[in-house]
């Protein structure tokens, strides 16, 4: 990932993984790379 430090997410969708962890999944507004931010347990 190019943007580990950059946590701004564009068009983010909240998803729940198989591990019951909430994540915000979206795109980096800078370069368009798919980025995820872990929000915590669902
Ligand atoms: Zn980026």
Image (spheres, helix red, strand yellow):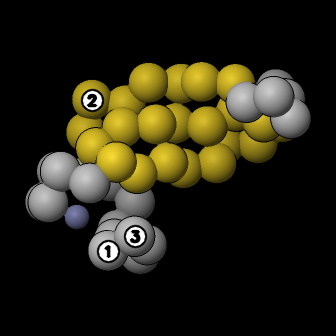
Q: Is residue 12 above or below residue 35?
A: above
Q: Which residue is mark 2?
A: 11
* Badge 3 vs badge 2, beta-carbon distance below 8 Å: no
Q: Between marks 3 and 2, how big is the CA–CA gap? A: 18 Å
**12 left or right, relative to 31:** right
Quadrant in which ligand 1 is drawn:
bottom left
Please name the residue shown 14% across and 60% down the image: 31
Pointer 2: residues within 10 angstroms few (<14), some, or many (20+)? few
User: Which structural element holds mark 2?
Assistant: strand
> Does the residue tagged 2 have its C-beta within 8 Å of any atom of ligand 1?
no
Q: Is residue 39 above or below residue 16?
A: below
User: Which structural element holds mark 1?
Assistant: loop
Horizontal and vertical percent position of residue 34: 34, 48
Horizontal and vertical percent position of residue 21: 78, 36
Q: Between marks 1 and 2, how big is the CA–CA gap? A: 18 Å
Horizontal and vertical percent position of residue 16: 70, 24
Q: Is residue 36 above or below residue 4?
A: above
> Does the residue tagged 1 have its C-beta within 8 Å of any atom of ligand 1?
yes
The quadrant the C terminus occupies is: top right
> Does the residue tagged 3 have its C-beta within 8 Å of any atom of ligand 1?
no
Foreground tag (3 vs 2)? 3
* Badge 1 vs badge 3, beta-carbon distance below 8 Å: yes
Q: Between marks 1 and 3, how big is the CA–CA gap? A: 4 Å
User: Which structural element holds mark 3?
Assistant: loop
Please tell me which residue lies in front, 16 or 39: 16
Please name the residue shown 18% across and 51% down the image: 32
Count of numbered circles on the image: 3
Q: Which residue is mark 1?
A: 2
Q: Which residue is mark 3?
A: 1
**11 left or right, relative to 41:** left
């Amino acid at each position: 990932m190019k943007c580990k430090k950059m946590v701004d997410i564009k068009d983010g969708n909240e998803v729940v993984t198989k591990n019951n962890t909430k994540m915000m999944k979206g795109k980096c507004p800078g370069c368009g790379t798919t980025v995820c931010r872990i929000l915590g347990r669902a």
